[in-house]
Image: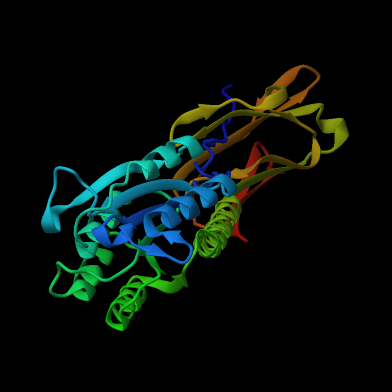
Amino acid sequence: MRGVAFVLLLVVWAGTAAAAIPSAVTLHFLLDGSSSMRARDAAGVRIDILRAGVASFARNHDRPELAIRAYGDSPSLTGCADVTLHLAPGRHTVEEVSAALGGLLPEGGSPISAGLRRAVRDLSGRVGTQVVVLIADGGDNCSKDPLADVANVMGEVPGVRIEVLGLNVGAAVDRDQLREIAAAGGGRYFEVGSAAQLANALGKIAADAYQREDDRVARLEEEEQRRAEWVARTRLRVSFTTTFPGFFCDAVYIDPLRINGAAVPLASGGRVGCSGATVLVDTPQSPGDYTVEVGYVKELKGERSPGELLTLQVTIESGVTTEVDLTTHMGLFSWGLKGAVNKQ
């Protein structure tokens, strides 16, 4: 006689293991290459101060990815279009950074808004914490409303922050504008007058970016862990309890298992004891509706007697352990099977 089958689909819900969170910190320098950067201050020529300060930072910080744009330094572009990408965002050696800095030729105007717009857009689609660092010795002399320009471009690349370093800024109106640009970009304004001060300010900006990125990753990892735990709690557990006395049974076989018509083999040929409870399945399972069929065969002295086939409708819910409890029972002329579905 044909054995009864309990049907079960052992498909583990994808995503139970927490995936690594992609992480990066990018500092994109927007550098002043206007003609005023040729001026000499107490600590030296401004463009030299800028070069030395940024290079010093690059030598001492290997965590961030870097990029360099400049305005006012192009030999071919003029006026408010004078914005050039010298180093695209990515991993760069100290030598590459120094070479890009050495190529700056201050001779033009100060299209700061145009430079910020392009620098922010350079960071579109990148992973992690993104910071544009404007280093300037004065304000924008191209845009009619640089603050509105900053606000508009900030909406294009969510999460980007603009920090501003004022290098020996002379006019109060320029300092005020640079402070307002920093505020509009969600960042801070730093006054610097030497390469050491510039490098120190960049270190503070980097430290803040590292902390924000570490916090972001920790938060996402916590969310991923909670999701994984929630998935792990979405389980299917099937137990099979036999109630046959030893003189009436040598073994019981679960034969086979099917769920939604798909057969699933069991270890040890599906053999369980004649009395007691056995957990057949305890695994994460995708939420959904399943048709479960279960049956068994009792063996005594080499002769096998099948029990009745039991069909259950089982709904697996997210975040809940669904238990299918199966129990054999003896009738007058047949071996029966009872089933119950419970939620935890």
Image coloring type? rainbow
Q: Residue at x 68, y 45 (%)?
A: 239
Q: Position of residue 196 (x, y in %)?
A: 55, 60
Q: Position of residue 22 (x, y in %)?
A: 49, 46
In terms of depth relative to the viewer, which is nearer, 69 or 240? 69
Relative side of 44 to 219, left or right: left
Is residue 93 visible in the rendered image? The answer is: no
Residue 5 vs 288, above or below: the answer is: above
Residue 253 vs 119, above or below: the answer is: above
Is residue 3 visible in the rendered image? The answer is: yes
Furthest residue toward right: 247
In terms of depth relative to the viewer, which is nearer, 170 or 262? 170
| Quadrant in which the N terminus is drawn | top right
In terms of depth relative to the viewer, which is nearer, 128 or 78? 78
Q: Residue at x 19, y 56 (%)?
A: 108
Instruction: Report which quarter residue 342 is drawn in.
Output: bottom right
Q: Residue at x 82, y 32 (%)?
A: 248
In terms of depth relative to the viewer, which is nearer, 231 or 129? 129
Relative side of 260 to 38, left or right: right
Relative side of 15 to 85, left or right: right
Furthest residue toward top: 302
Residue 294 vs 178, above or below: the answer is: above
| Quadrant in which the C terminus is drawn | bottom right
Q: Position of residue 233 (x, y in %)?
A: 60, 54
Q: Residue at x 12, y 74 (%)?
A: 144
Q: Position of residue 300 (x, y in %)?
A: 78, 24
Relative side of 283 to 176, left or right: right
Count the numbered circles shown.
Answer: 0
